Amino acid sequence: MPSFAAILIALAALGVTASNAQTAATATVKAIQPGLFEVAGPSVNDAIAAGITKIVATPGKGFRSIQIQSPWGDSYHGWPRNMKPVAFTITSSGAGTATISAPAFTEANKADYKAAIETIVPFAITATRQNRQLSEGSGR
């Protein structure tokens, strides 16, 4: 069985670093509003695994309604068409914990938040991957 040091050397030769590693473990997610975890929990774990440190969704800011922060840069995007705008923030501490807050979240608008989070988080993951590729280069 190869030693741990030999594996690290092999990974370094292939261009894989510890910062590139993504864990499959789930993070500890704290939802500020009751019921919000059930809506956003799995999506928040995906965002953390992608390296996203913060997503701020603020309706009414045009092409800056969605802000995505990561170690590879920030990006700003408009609100998705045909989707009811709802405000929320997902913040990751980087230590496997995250907080999600949505001050206007209620049981009555739960479906709106679920739709927004399930649309915005995958989009944010894609944008973060693109930023990462641009900042790290193609590796060729």
Image (cartoon, rainbow, N blue to C red):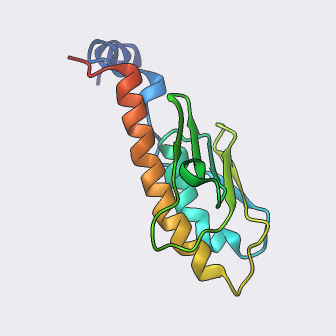
At horizontal 48% and vertical 25% (from top left) the residue drawn is 19
> In the picture shown, does residue 28 fall above or below 15?
below
Q: Position of residue 37 (x, y in %)?
A: 67, 68
32 left or right of 52? right
Q: Position of residue 40 (x, y in %)?
A: 60, 66
At horizontal 46% and vertical 24% (from top left) the residue drawn is 18
Residue in front for this viewpoint, 68 or 91: 68
Residue in front for this viewpoint, 51 or 65: 65
Q: Position of residue 71 (x, y in %)?
A: 55, 29
Count all numbered tags in the image, as a single digit: 0
At horizontal 58% and vertical 47% (from top left) the residue drawn is 64
> In the picture shown, does residue 46 fall above or below 20?
below
Residue in front for this viewpoint, 134 or 48: 134
> In the picture shown, does residue 26 fall above or below 117?
above
Residue found at the very far bottom of the displayed protein: 108
65 left or right of 35? left
At horizontal 68% and vertical 63% (from top left) the residue drawn is 87
Residue found at the very far left of the displayed protein: 140
Q: Quarter-wise, where is residue 2 in the image?
A: top left
> In the picture shown, does residue 71 fall above or below 11?
below
Q: Position of residue 39 (x, y in %)?
A: 60, 72
Q: Quarter-wise, where is residue 133 in the image?
A: top left
Q: Quarter-wise, where is residue 137 in the image?
A: top left
Residue in front for this viewpoint, 40 or 126: 126
Q: Quadrant of the C terminus?
A: top left
Q: Quadrant of the N terminus?
A: top left
